[in-house]
Image (cartoon, rainbow, N blue to C red):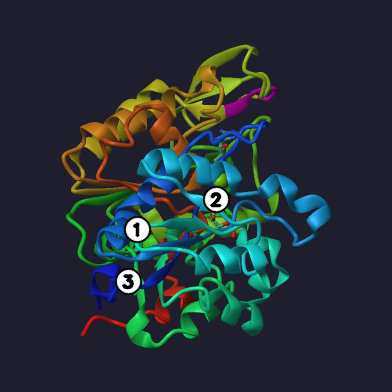
Amino acid sequence: MAKRTIADLNLKGRKCLIRVDFNVPQGKDGSISDDRRIRAALPTIRHALKEGAAVILVSHLGRPTGDPATDGPFTLAPVATRLGELLGQPVVHASDTVGPDAQAKAAALKPGDVLLLENVRFNKGEKKGDAAFAAALAGLADCYVNDAFGTCHRDEASMVAVPECKSPGDRAIGFLVAKEVEILDKLLGHPAKPMIAVMGGAKVSDKIGVITNLLPKIDALLVGGAMTYTFLKAQGHSTGGSRVEADKLDLARQILEAAGPKLRLPLDHLVSKSLDPTSETMVVEGSDIPDGWIGIDIGPKTIAAYGEAVRNAGTVIWNGPMGKFEDEPFRKGTAGVAAAMAESKGITVVGGGETAEAAELFGVAEKVSHVSTGGGAFLESLEGKTFNSLKVIPDLN
Ligand code: ADP
Ligand code: 3PG
Ligand code: MG
């Protein structure tokens, strides 16, 4: 059932609190290295402004503990500056979330103004879902919008208790959350066939829930990345110095058995003497990694085979890089899957923190059907979980 969106809210002359996920990656100097999450919230913010609301934005950034002595680097000040540039209008930044500065700045807002509150996790009440904190935050505005897809799997105050302070008619999701949920519903409900999943990344253990939920729905699961070697080890192959989760071998065997021929492992591997990008590499065919070598990327035959499957699929879900793509010598596999995603005529969806970064790096983020702004939220959605943050938003009737 579709949820009420911001388009269903009465906004004229009112103050609208929009929970966004501006938890963006930053360089050591605090500069924003990827502003995708900020750009993704713009349609909702612009709609609220166009309809005559004053906008109050609230977000977390990183994982501060609520201790003023150490929280400083997690300020949203650089985000306020970037948002102002993107919106083309000043964004007022409050130095607290519900304190005197936020109260005064929220009270002074006129229709068309934008205020970004300070990091909501500077308040210990946020993580705890504290009722008094939620009431103070909700009290700054007349209505509430959740456009923070990346945070939808968290039951924090600004995600659940704050909307509960508002009457159901004054709660809605934003356009970003609506789009993410619609795409995920389609993937898990009525996907164009054949549907395949390409999964890689660091650990099998992070992805078990996703694999288990997706297997019955998909036609093939193409495995790459470090998780390959836990599966190969479970099959009795030698894995050299590759990353293997020794305590997950039984689980890997169970997945292999349940999946049968649906689960495809690499046909060849790029192996390296060490994780250092300057170290010696070679291509190994088959399923055994020699002693003294680490499986670091999928090999050329696998890149071709996986690329073909991706290009010919009706729907592709991609989560997890095919190798240690951060280093240039180890990125051909991830770049190859990214290119095939861009060329595929099917519905192509990318999700996961590092996978989304890879899609940007290889220039395909605008060429695939959708790059999710969710990391954990995307994975938990694929696991079939439902979120309290969305349950509190009424269905459209
Ligand atoms: P996502 O955040 O997209 O869900 P993960 O967190 O599961 O992805 O995994 C991403 C990480 O996995 C990357 O940082 C990448 O370097 C690493 N990785 C992938 N394949 C390998 C490999 N063969 N050996 C070591 N690290 C790998
Ligand atoms: C994310 O980056 O996945 C979201 O912003 C949630 O952040 P968290 O894992 O710190 O709750
Ligand atoms: Mg990750």
Query: Is 168 a magenta residue?
Result: no
Mark 2 residue crowding within 10 angstroms, few (<14) / some (14–19) / many (20+): many
**What residue did someone put label 2 on?**
23
Q: Which residue is mark 3?
A: 13
- Which residue: 24% across, 75% down? 8
Disc 2 CB within 8 Å of nearest ligand 2 atom: yes
Residue at 38% in and 27% down: 362
Dot 3: within a 10 Å radius of its alpha carbon, few (fewer than 14), some, or many (20 or more) residues? some
> Do tag 2 and tag 1 residues touch (Cβ < 8 Å)?
no
Specify start and end residues of the magenta stretch as a single range: 291-295
Name the image quarter holding residue 188.
bottom left
What residue is shown with label 1? 112
Q: Tell me which residue sits at (34%, 74%) in the image.
A: 172
Q: Position of residue 60 (x, y in %)?
A: 58, 57
Q: Is residue 294 magenta?
A: yes
Question: How would you classify the magenta stretch by its main secondary structure?
Answer: loop
Ligand 1 occupies quarter: top right
Three-letter code for the amino acid on which mark 3 is drawn: Gly
